[in-house]
Amino acid sequence: MTEERQLSHGIDLETLEGFAAHAATNPEAVQLGLGASATYEGTAAHSLAKIDSYELGGETIARETREYTVPYGAWKEVLDAGGWVGGIDRIEPVEAALSALAACINVGISINAAANGVAIDHLQTRVRTDFDPAVLFSLKGLEAADSVFKNLTAEIEVDGENFDRDQIDEWARRAPVYTFVSLDQDVDMTINTPAEVVGDD
């Protein structure tokens, strides 16, 4: 007779428990190396982003089903006002970051809910911010970068059993993208240019 699996939030809890135990004793085996690229498409603010391979425990994992592309741009009304010719709506990178934050908060909550036997009937996270583009358009110096975003908020709407607000708040703050945007992150910037052609003397 096949033993029935215990599932919660789409996760086999026995497997999750084993994974967590393995991660606790072998942390290097679950370290992730993540990346993305974006190629400029010839129109200011337009890039085609690509996400594909990643690293797990030092091993590169690549397959065609992980080759995602996202066309980024901006808002048609803003493009029209700024002089773009034939401007069209595209996902704007800040909006993509906000959606990633909202989705990742759901990740933090749902994974920990599953691990703690908490049932969730409904979960939706809304994220918004006020954005001042003055630094982007060089109307202010880089010293004003900390004023670009104001009033970043996350509103979590949740319905279920056996949890409280403090618990949900803690699980939300465990979301990796929450850490990414809420804590200081140093970006090691490298600029690569074509090698200079040395003329004949």
Image (tube, helix red, strand yellow):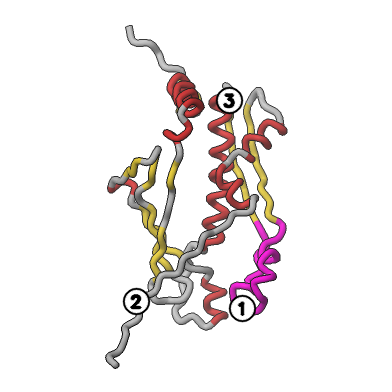
148 inside magenta stretch: yes
Choose mark 2 or mark 3, whichever is in front: 2
The answer to which of marks 2 and 1 sits earlier in the sequence is: 1
Residue behind mark 1: 138
**Circle 3 residue:** 119
Q: Position of residue 130 (x, y in %)?
A: 68, 62
Label 1 secondary element:
loop
- Which quadrant of the figure contains the C terminus? bottom left
- Is residue 65 shown left or right of residue 73? left
Mark 3 or mark 1, which is nearer to you?
Answer: 1
* Horizontal and vertical percent position of residue 47: 42, 67
- Looking at the image, which is closer to me, 21 or 137? 21
- Local secondary structure at mark 2: loop
Amino acid type of the residue that numbered disc 3 sits on in the rendered structure = Ala
For the record, the magenta segment spans 129-151
**In the rendered view, would you say 118 is above or below 133?**
above
- Whether residue 3 appears in magenta in the rendering, the answer is no
Considering only vertical position in the picture, is 189 above or below 54?
below
How far separated are the C-alphas under marks 2 and 3? 58 Å
Which residue is more in the foreground, 92 or 17?
17
Residues at marks 2 and 1, CA–CA distance in whole angstroms: 28 Å
> Residue 141's x, y, as percent?
66, 75
Q: Is mark 3 on a helix, strand or loop?
A: loop
- Above or below — where is 74 with respect to 66? below
How many residues crowd around disc 3 within 10 Å: few (fewer than 14), some, or many (20 or more)?
A: some
Residue wearing tag 2: 195
Which image quadrant for residue 94? bottom right
Mark 2 or mark 3: which comes first in sequence? 3
* The N terminus, quarter of image: top left
**Residue drawn at 45 percent across, 21 percent down:** 18
Residue neighbourhood size for the residue with mark 2, other residues' Cα within 10 Å, grouped as few (<14), some (14–19), many (≥20): few
Tag 1: Cα neighbours inside 10 Å, few (<14), some, or many (≥20)? few
